[in-house]
Structures are given as C-alpha cells and as structure tokens.
Image: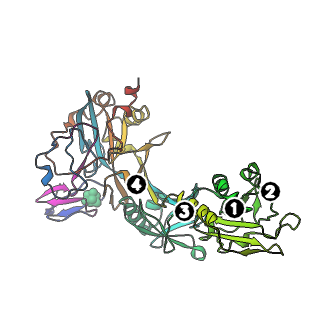
C-alpha cells in the first residue's frame, strides 16, 4: 500500500508494526523490502526434496543458481517449505502459498506460511554434569532475564528460554533481548548467557549442535550414566583388579562393595564410609555440593567425600579406585597401616577401565528445540473455520511440519509444536519487532480433507505454478522426515 502523504514509500502489512518502507530499503525486520515500488520478501522461498523418487531436473538451469544452501535438488517431489514464504497479517487472508501436488496417486495440498509467534520459546538441553545453576535460577542475556533453569534430565541440564512472559510481560528491553537471543539460538548461532545471581553465576555459551562452553571451558563428554549405573555397567572390569570403587556423581554416587552389582559378584565389604545421604545399598545422594569438579560436584579431591574406614572391616593394602562418571577424572589409592588412603600409581587395567567409561560417553552437545503455539489467527490463513484445522491435526488428517522438519504436536488443546532447529533449513527463523519470532509452519493434508475443513480452495496453486518464484533449493537428508509421506496420515493406516 502506498503512503498517501509520502508516495515513494510503501506500507508493509505483514505484521502489526506496519512499516513504511522507502524505495530500495527494507523494513524493521529486514524480511520485507521496497523493490521498485513493490513489496517483496527478501529471502527466497525454500524448497526441499522429499521422497525417494528418481531424481530429475525440477527447474531449468537449477545448477546455475547462486546462493545455494546445500546440494542441488532436482526432485520430482519438491516440498515447499514456509521458509521465505512470507506472512499473512491480519490472518483472515489466505496463507502465502497453498500448494497442491499428486503424491503417489493422492491429491495433496500443503498450506505454507511464516507464522508470527508471540507465544514461543526454546528448550535447550545441555549435555553436561557440571553445575550451571540451580533449578529455577534465572537465565540472563545482556543483563535481562530471558528464562530459567528447569528440571535436569539424565546427564543433561535443561533451560527454558523465552515465552510470552519475557517477550511481552517485562520491559521493552527485556522483550527485545529475549527475542534476539531466541532468534540467534534458533538460527544456530552461539549465544552467551549468564545463569543465576552474582554470588553463584555461571557463564554458558550455547549453540545448537555444538559443545557448550561453561565458564570458559568447552565441555567434552556427556556422562555415561549416574554413579550407580556406572557401577553396574563396569563392575566386571574392576573385580579382579581392585577391592573398592567409588563412582563420584553429583546426583547418585555409587560404591561397588555395597551395590547390588558388587554383591552379586561376591565383592566383600570394605568398611568404606561415605559422606552424604544413603539411598539404597551402594547409592548415595548429596556427597558434595554441585559444581564443576568431579562428576558435577564441587570437589577436586575425591577423598573429601569419604569418612574414616571401619577398622573392624578394612585392611592395610586395600585397593581403592575413585572415578568420575565421564572417566575424565580418576585416582587410585591403597590404605596404609592406619587405614588412610594413600595415592599410588594406577595399574594398566584400572586405567583402561577409566578409558572405557570415557569411551562410552557421548560427545557433549547443545540441543535447541523451538516451541510455539500456532494461534487462533494463524490458523485462519489455512481455513475459514480455524478450529477444524486443530481437530484435523489431532485426528492425524493434517500433518504439521516446520521448514519440512517433523514437528511434535503437544496433546490437548491448540496446535503447540516443538521442533529441533537442526532438522530445519538454515536461517529458518526471523523476527518482528513487536517482539515475536517468525517461524515456518506447513500444514499438509489431502485436498479432499482441505475442502471439508473449509480451506481456501480458490487459492490452491500447483507446485509447477510457483516454480517461477525466486527459490533456494536444498537437499533433503535421506534419513530425514518426509512431510508428505502417506504414513503420516490416519487414512493411510486403515
Ligand atoms: S517489521 Fe517486517 S513484517 Fe513487520 S511491517 Fe515491518 S517489514 Fe513488514
């Protein structure tokens, strides 16, 4: 729309900001621009190959295109993602692309739009034992609160970042900083965050698919399991070479001679005394405080978690191995005449057992999952009767993907999706300064089902009809999800 008082500017109506954009310039989000008086989406529409059909040229001169992200796609079954598709606002308008094609004899349609998500955030899984903050500690970016530490998972710390409260419920700066951190994390960039308050603050650098950097140190390994699990897994490696093993862990420290695995292998009692709270035999909680030392505790000297050995049970020369859950730290001791552990050189088999623990650890990485709600109005771009879309998704008649990646749809009401950003094309995310994230979302279903739910039938285009648009073509990983596969739909399972 032209600005009447300023004719060289045009108004972008793709989000509530409603920018007036001068010729040759882009709007506040850099997603739309004024190109010779026409409003254009700056980034090209992204198409990925989906399916296993014979590869043939999809577009003439495809191999000559510049700006290729990935390999050339010359597939008979292109999947039009919403990346670069554009946004509809207000959402009573049909989605930017409603694309039909025949998939193995069934007329299918994919409704494609870049959704503006005010209700969105990321869940970050950080594979480390090291303490980065207590549950419920606040996570800061540029001094602004953007999320919190949530419940740890097995071998991983978890953060919940963003969400509508941080985007809209705080100061303007909090919303802007939150949106920026989410955008960069979703687009696979590294982001520096601080966790907790000044007296116990940790710095973390997070990037999807990369090892986390915790207080300046790059994490290498994710623990093999808790201390108790490690006792069970590696007991056979130890019984011929040592009398006692302690696997130090912030959550559950394991003790071989007391553990059920040790008992079944006839390991005799050693008179060892552990600090912390005994849970079940051979399993101890809270042997130390959380930290960045052995097994995610704050200790650097493992002997600090031991009490004096029981003189009625222990003996001079008792052999003791202490090892962390990643095998990165280990120490070998023998009891002297006073039953005090004295450091000794570790034997080759025990050293090999620590190496085996390390070998069984997976590399430490950060996983970033985008989570957002496809709201009431976004659905109107798909159908005039939005609740029918929700029901159709729940009934497995409509398949939801984000940039072609499989999106987990939460049970219950609404369409709340969660997707691994590494499964999506690069640069899938944008933002608008309201603030909100812009993320691609596609709804794929049979044309007949689309008609039934009140879809915008007059706006369906064949995939060939949009082939002239400026496009970025990327190759689908062979093992990746196929959003158009029949198996995604209930009707194919009858
Ligand atoms: S912020 Fe972007 S989408 Fe929103 S009106 Fe401006 S140019 Fe358009």
Picture quadrant of residue 269: bottom right
Q: CA distance from mark 3 to mark 4?
A: 31 Å
**On residue 268, which mark appears?**
2
Mark 3, residue position = 128
First in sequence, mark 1 or 4: give its number. 4
Q: Is residue 350 above or below residue 379?
A: below
Confirm whether residue 136 shows in the render: no
Query: In percent of the image, x 44 and y 34: which residue is there?
Result: 394
Q: Is residue 110 left or right of residue 327?
A: left
Q: Nearer the viewer, mark 1 or mark 4?
A: 1
**On residue 241, which mark appears?**
1
Mark 4, residue position = 118
**On residue 477, which mark appears?**
none
Q: CA distance from mark 1 to mark 2?
A: 14 Å
Query: In percent of the image, x 76 and y 69: which residue is there?
Result: 306
Whether the magenta-drawn stretch holds residue 31 is answered as: yes
Q: CA distance from mark 2 to mark 4?
A: 61 Å
Task: List x then y, in percent, for residue 464.
Answer: 16, 39
Task: List x then y, in percent, for residue 55.
Answer: 20, 40
Q: CA distance from mark 1 to mark 4?
A: 59 Å
First in sequence, mark 1 or 2: give its number. 1
Residues under numbered marks 2 and 3 in contact, where contact means CB atoms less than 8 Å apart: no
First in sequence, mark 1 or 3: give its number. 3
Q: Which residues are magenta?
A: 28-55
Confirm whether residue 466 shows in the render: yes
């Amino acid at each position: 729309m032209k600005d009447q008082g300023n004719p060289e500017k045009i108004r972008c109506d793709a989000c509530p900001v409603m920018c007036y954009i001068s010729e040759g310039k882009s709007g506040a989000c850099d997603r739309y621009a004024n190109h010779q008086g026409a409003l254009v989406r700056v980034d090209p529409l992204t198409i990925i190959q989906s399916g296993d059909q014979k590869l043939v040229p999809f577009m003439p001169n495809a191999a000559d295109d510049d700006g290729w992200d990935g390999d050339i796609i010359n597939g008979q079954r292109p999947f039009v993602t919403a990346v670069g598709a554009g946004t509809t606002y207000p959402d009573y308008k049909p989605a930017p692309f409603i694309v039909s094609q025949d998939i193995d004899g069934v007329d299918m349609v994919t409704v494609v739009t870049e959704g503006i998500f005010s209700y969105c955030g990321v869940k970050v899984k950080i594979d480390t034992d090291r303490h980065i903050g207590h549950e419920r500690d606040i996570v800061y970016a540029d001094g602004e609160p953007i999320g919190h530490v949530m419940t740890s998972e097995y071998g991983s710390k978890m953060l919940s970042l963003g969400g509508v409260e941080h985007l809209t419920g705080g100061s303007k700066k909090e919303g802007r900083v939150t949106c920026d951190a989410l955008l960069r994390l979703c687009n696979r960039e590294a982001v520096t965050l601080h966790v907790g308050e000044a007296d116990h603050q940790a710095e973390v650098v997070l990037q999807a698919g990369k090892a986390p950097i915790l207080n300046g140190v790059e994490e290498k390994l994710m623990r093999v399991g808790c201390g108790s699990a490690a006792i069970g897994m590696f007991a056979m490696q130890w019984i011929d070479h040592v009398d006692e093993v302690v696997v130090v862990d912030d959550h559950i420290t394991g003790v071989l001679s007391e553990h059920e695995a040790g008992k079944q292998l006839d390991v005799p009692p050693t008179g060892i005394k552990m600090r912390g709270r005994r849970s079940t035999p051979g399993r101890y909680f809270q042997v130390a405080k959380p930290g960045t030392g052995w097994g995610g505790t704050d200790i650097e000297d493992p002997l600090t978690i031991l009490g004096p050995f029981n003189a009625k049970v222990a003996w001079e020369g008792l052999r003791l191995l202490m090892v962390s859950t990643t095998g990165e730290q280990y120490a070998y001791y023998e009891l002297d005449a006073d039953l005090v552990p004295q450091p000794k050189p570790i034997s080759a088999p025990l050293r090999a057992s620590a190496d085996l623990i390390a070998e069984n650890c997976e590399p430490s990485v950060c996983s970033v999952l985008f989570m957002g709600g496809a709201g009431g109005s976004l659905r109107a771009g798909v159908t005039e009767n939005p609740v029918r879309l929700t029901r159709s998704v729940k009934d497995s008649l409509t398949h939801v993907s984000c940039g072609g990646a499989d999106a987990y749809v939460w049970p219950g009401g609404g369409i709340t999706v969660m997707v691994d950003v590494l499964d999506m094309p690069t640069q899938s995310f944008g933002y608008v300064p309201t603030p909100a994230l812009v993320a691609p979302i596609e709804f794929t279903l049979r044309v007949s089902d689309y008609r039934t739910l009140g879809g915008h039938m007059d706006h369906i285009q064949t995939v060939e009809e949009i082939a002239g648009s400026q496009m970025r073509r990327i190759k689908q990983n062979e093992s990746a999800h196929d959003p158009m596969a029949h198996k995604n739909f209930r009707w194919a399972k009858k």
